[in-house]
Image (tube, helix red, strand yellow):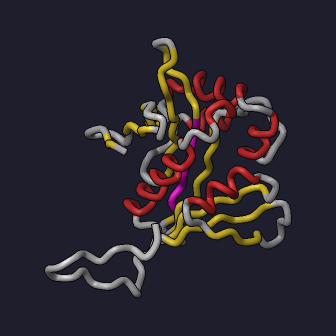
Amino acid sequence: MAPAPGDFAGVLRLPAGADVTLRPVSPDDGGALQAYVRALSQQSRYNRFFAALNELPPSELEHVTHLDRHCELALLAETCILGAPLVIAEARYAFSRERRECEFALSIADAWRGKGIGTLIMADMERRARSLGAERLVADVLRSNEPMKALARKAGFTLADVPRDAKLIRIVKDLAPSRTARPPRVGGAPNLPLAA
């Protein structure tokens, strides 16, 4: 991820080599965001919004396009197809100072799944959460959403039940520095991680 100066935007490089711009949603993005949501399959919309909807309600669209960007941010991932930008994923997060956690949500266009964009966006969410001082990165996911659960496991999240809602699970990644981390060696070979 290469951050753009003075902005929250950056460029993600997919494993196949394509560049994807990840940038904040602006007040001018209502149409692009709504077109993205409408183009998702019915199952993808249900997995993302936990409801059978065809598009975002006007009040939600207004909210998402006018976040304060201090503790909440909505992001669009775009690529260029035939010279025109195409939204291929969206993500949002909200940071709670009291709980020291960052809650996020993510969706990827059906045609762009399995290309590595989800892994890159999850890593970006983790970086953003750490920079805010979050100790945990969390999301509620439908228990039936196997692709998101697989992505979460791959990214090092744990899965837990959500009390009082059997249809959901919570994915959690601890971001707090490890208390058992070894100090760096002075001279000689550096400490290497036990697993990657």
Question: Within the image, what quadrant is residue 143 found in?
Answer: bottom right
| Prevalent SS, magenta region | strand
Q: Magenta residues?
A: 89-95
Q: Which residue occupies 53% across, 50% down?
A: 119
Q: Count the marks: how many?
A: 0
Q: Nearer the viewer, residue 74 or 43?
A: 43
**In this rendering, is residue 32 above or below 22?**
above
Residue 1 position in % (x across, y down): 37, 45
Position in image of residue 108 (x %, y %)? 63, 38
Res 39 quadrant in image? top right
User: What residue sits 47% from the left and 54% below the top?
Assistant: 123
In this view, the residue farthest toward the front is 189
Q: Is residue 32 above or below residue 161?
A: above
User: Position of 53 compared to 155: left or right?
Assistant: right
Which picture quadrant has residue 191?
A: bottom left
In this orientation, which residue lies closer to the viewer: 185 or 105? 185
- Please name the residue shown 21% across and 82% down the image: 185
Question: Measured from the top left, where is residue 179 in percent x and y?
Answer: 40, 86
Residue 129: image x %, image y %?
A: 45, 59
Asked whether 189 falls inside the magenta stretch, the response is no
